[in-house]
Image: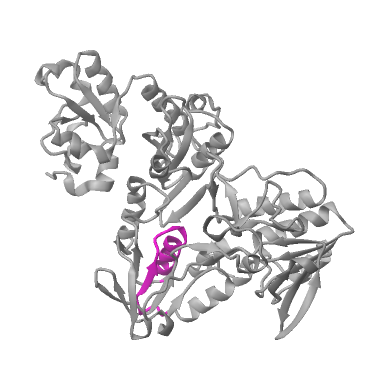
Amino acid sequence: MKVVIVGGVAGGMSAATRLRRLDEDAEIVVLEKGPYVSFANCGLPYYLSGEIADRSDLIVQTADKLQQRFNLDVRPNHEVTQILPERHEVVVRHDGQESRESYDRLILSPGAAPVVPPIVGLDTAENVHVLRNIPDLDGLMAGLKADQPSLVVGGGFIGLEVAEALTKRGVAVTVVEQADHVLPALDTEMAAFAENELRQHGVRVVTGQAVAAFQDRGETVVLTDVTQISTGLTLLAVGVRPDTRLAKEAGLKLGLRGGLVVDHHYQTSDPSIYAVGDAIVVNQVLDGTPTLIPLASPANRQGRQVADNLAGLDRPNQGSLGTAIVRVFDLTAAATGFSEQQAKEKGLKASVIHVRGTSHAGYFPGGTPLLLKLIFNADSGAIYGAQGVGKAGVDKRLDVLATAIKGGLTVADLPELELTYAPPFGSAKDPVNMLGYAAQNVMDGLSHSIQWSELPAALQAGKRVLDVRDPSELKEGVFPNSVTIPLNELRERLDELDPKQAYVVSCFSGQRSYMAERILRQHGFDVVNLDGAFNLYRAVRSQDLVKF
């Protein structure tokens, strides 16, 4: 069997090396249009920042080493320009010459291409870059000048990684994001922590705007509100699209946003052609709907699985969840599954809770706060998604929650998870366990909460905030027209509250306000808990608070 693989890196090289381990006799040819067939594209921003000091560390394997270890015929700088399905051949361009390569089975792993919007003046701009591979990185660094400001267009994961990298090189950075907040994969209130982190490190953040035009050969950028920004370098990071031109021209079936349609064994509409990676449409694990998830982990898994299928092992694609993480200076932000916004757009009955915890036991030195968000069904307990922000420990909590979702666990299972505990590593009641407890309280009717976004309407309707923080905490700000009674004094001071008044109870993080809610509810008060409490509301709407 002769297998030709178009594209290396994650999906293509995983397929090639796995197939060799399964079939020593197969002829395996890898055609890569770029000079590097196996490189760490996720590491590019960290070389830009200087954290990865040696450029060669980005190159995972070379063609020579792959040939020596796996007996693979790896050909860099060989671009496939056409697929001829009826002939079982591909047309290849190398050094200006064209040739044809036959195949018994063809695996397409072309990846995704950066989205480049049709912006006025872009064709004459001399300092606009994208970042998908090592040649892109080389071009970006060659055009970088420390004494000139830079602009990052797009506040997603790659955009923020590059903004951080440029800032660490001493460059003044502006981030422009068309959505109303950075990190659109996260919900507004969770992304607010990342936005605040950017500003604290000197990054200018502009949201709700897009680039309308480039002027002065790219040195002046005009936004949709006609604001002008001077920049010595611009990075476009507005997203990616499946790179499926070859597949389309070959008549293969395409689906969502031009992605390649494959079956559960990665077979395209042509039974001899398979596809993996960023270019294919996958099923969302949560509801089975078609989606695109251009991430390295799914691509590596798919490459291995397609090799298994070609070798006669039944290894179906079980779908993807979409779990991602990003570092923004000293903050980590991560998400898995549906966001609250996505869940509601899909018509799901989504409830939300926020739990504040610490990276490890609070009494052990060095612990830092983290905030977790759970999106779930309050009737069935099904978990739709989760998000987290914090300085440390966010990754392992989101990994647990992603595993729980993919394993079909419900919120009732979260308190039962036996997670590792010792003071330097976690808490006896891990924040993941606490998410389960809090969700159960909602499901059991023990707590009725409203979200930060619902508070203004609740106050407008006549409710009043009861703040149960201690007096020393109030200097950070208070809610307008609020009543303040510390939790420890609440029982003795119930007579200061109006039994006819509806209250929204809040503390700093939500734990004490839940306790206050239970006290008040059992004394006949009309009360709801402000989920996430003061800490969350301050991150999103600090302008609404009153400062002493």
Residue that lies at the very extreme toward the top in this rendered image: 523
Residue toward you, 386 or 243: 243
Q: Quadrant of residue 183?
A: bottom left
Q: Residue at x 83, y 66 (%)?
A: 68
Residue toward you, 82 or 364: 82
Q: Residue at x 37, y 34 (%)?
A: 352
Going by the image, does 429 lie left or right of 445? right
Q: Quadrant of the N terminus?
A: bottom right
**On screen, residue 169 above or below 437:** below
- Residue 371, how many percent across, how many down? 38, 40
> Residue 167 colored magenta?
yes
Q: Residue at x 61, y 63 (%)?
A: 111
> Residue 166 colored magenta?
yes
* Colouring convention used in this rendered image of the protein: one colour
**On screen, residue 485 above or below 98:** above
Residue range in magenta is 145-169
- Residue 353, how many percent across, how many down? 37, 33
Going by the image, does 206 lie left or right of 357? left
**On screen, residue 401 above or below 62:** above
Q: Is residue 468 visible?
A: no
Going by the image, does 438 lie left or right of 404? left
Residue toward you, 488 or 521: 521
Q: Quadrant of the C terminus?
A: top left
- Residue 161, how many percent across, how many down? 45, 61
Q: Is residue 322 visible?
A: yes
Q: How many marks?
A: 0
Q: Quadrant of residue 320?
A: top right
